[in-house]
Image (spheres, coloured by chain):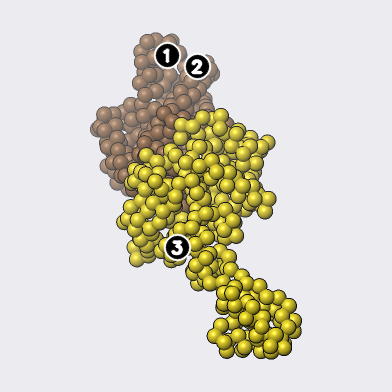
Chain colours: A brown, B yellow
Amino acid sequence: MRIFLSEWRKLRRPTLFLGSMGAVIAVTALIVSLLFLLIDSDTGNAERGMRITREILALSSGITIGFSNSSGLLGLVALCVFAAQTAQEYSYGTLRNLLVREPRRLRLLIGKYLSMSIFALISVIISAITSVALAFALSGTAKVETAAWRTADARVELLETFINVLISTIGYGTIGMILGLILRSPISSISIGVGWLLVVESIVSIAWSPSADWMPGSLLGVVAAGGSPLGVSESLSYTEALIRVSALLLVAAVASGLTFRRRDVAS
Amino acid sequence: MSAISVAGLTKRYGELIAVNGATFEVPLGTICGFVGPNGSGKTTTIRMLLSLIEPTSGSGQILDESISHPERYLSKVGAMIEGPAFYPALSGAENLKVLATLGGYSHDRVPELIDLVGLSGRGGDKYKTYSLGMKQRLGIAAALLPNPKLLILDEPTNGLDPAGIQEIRDLLSKLAKDGVTVFVSSHLLSEIEMISEYLVMLRKGEVIFFGKTIDLLHRSRPIIVARPESTSDLVKLKNLVDSVGHPAVIDGDLLRVDAGEDWSAELNKLAFENNILLRQLTPVRPNLEETFFEMTEER
């Protein structure tokens, strides 16, 4: 609890907290706005030129589409925060202060992780509120029926999507934290993480499509969408994706955690 | 019981031996200086004591607890190592609260410590706006957070002006009087000599002295400094002194004679008999800096 609260003191500073939450609101608003305002566009209104029609949006699951589509960018925000908060302990030299006050290194790491996960939870809540509010606000302009959004089914869909997006966001954050531990530099961790997820995974998937079923970014996309989104083999179920990405992240997290536990803190 | 006790402590990085079989003890309630040239292994030793790096071999105890169980003693240890390190975007007070929360210490100590180290009125300012001296003071405040029984400070006076150095010296002396053991490394040997009752000296990773500072100073041979009225007599005086078996060196307009205080009268007589008038004749015991250079051969 001490470690959690200590980390939270750093996370709640206005520039970081308000800046990150502002980015979450902006990203969510952009994606939901494009979804509704480009509904009649020939170039599509969702990721990779995909078209989400009025009929699909009017379903009980329609209320969650904008929120779910925001998950990738929400994940990138989480990756940046987790990576920066972890790696800057090395770049500022503050890690030695922390380890003198809490020498049980794995405990320190877990406390930091939990604190950052709460930060991710708040960002997902804010994204959910923003997307739902904006969906209702733009439904009139886009001429989308909202009757099904007020049903119990819609609430269940929203809860499921919330959980999936949360898992995905924390997954992206975990990747950021692992990179921060390994690379010990905020800039390197963020640039390599974002570069991998946005560029390298896409190139590798285009060159050899089955690889998408094993790429952490693609797998987290499947989890966030509650099933296979575009570009990922349709045979890959939500459960398979969740198991695969959990296994990948668990192995990487254990390896980096053990390295952190043993590694000399020499600067 | 010793505050610090290490035996055969060694840290090896591949072929490089940063610390080689360090063995020393620091008694409780004393101020102990930790000196050595750059790269002699001081910071590596401190890192091992604080469990930041793992020794290759050897053992150590801090406040009667093994250094392999840092969780048992670090709550009673305050430390500042390799200069102050804090979060630039947080204020000085907020930085201390981060560490106080982590260590489970009362936040009431934060304003108290900020006043103690002379940062009154600046605790609410962001750390990135602090001068080097202010950062150093905040580092000392952070080290004092746990109300430590042992304080380990690595170059605490870096960046401080003379008044600041004196304040820190007084603070450390006061802490020692209150029973806190202070283990302090510094390049300011005159400061160390003034405040340290005990001393650990390192050279090339090896401990070349540990014990009372006064014992080290008494170990060095005293010299006699003579200044002839006329500098043209310097060489003549040197030859005279050399001829009676006391090696001497000319240093500017002075002659430094390798001899004890009791030979001063003889030297005065020798000079007088050879028509050399002396303007100065002073027996000198080498200070810590001279002893340090002599022992570490780093002049």
Mark 3: secondary structure: strand
- The verdict on a common chain for dots 2 and 1 is yes
Residue at the image point whose x is 36% and y is 51% from the top = B60
Alpha carbon of mark 2 to alpha carbon of mark 1: how far? Answer: 9 Å
Q: Marks 2 and 3: which is nearer the front?
A: 3
Verify CB contact (< 8 Å) between mark 2 and mark 1. yes
Residue ID for mark 1: A149
Whole-percent x, y for residue B123 in the image: 63, 36
Residue at the image point whose x is 42% and y is 41% from the top = B74
Chain letter behind tag 3: B
In which quadrant will I find the N terminus of chain A?
top left
Alpha carbon of mark 2 to alpha carbon of mark 3: how far? Answer: 78 Å
Mark 1: secondary structure: helix
Residue B27 visible to an observer of this rendering:
yes
Residue ID for mark 3: B209
Residue B215 in the figure: left or right of residue A60: right
> For mark 2, does the 10 Å Cα neighbourhood hold few (<14), some (14 to 19), or many (20 or more) residues?
some
Chain letter behind tag 1: A
Mark 2: secondary structure: helix
Closest to the observer, A110 or B113: B113
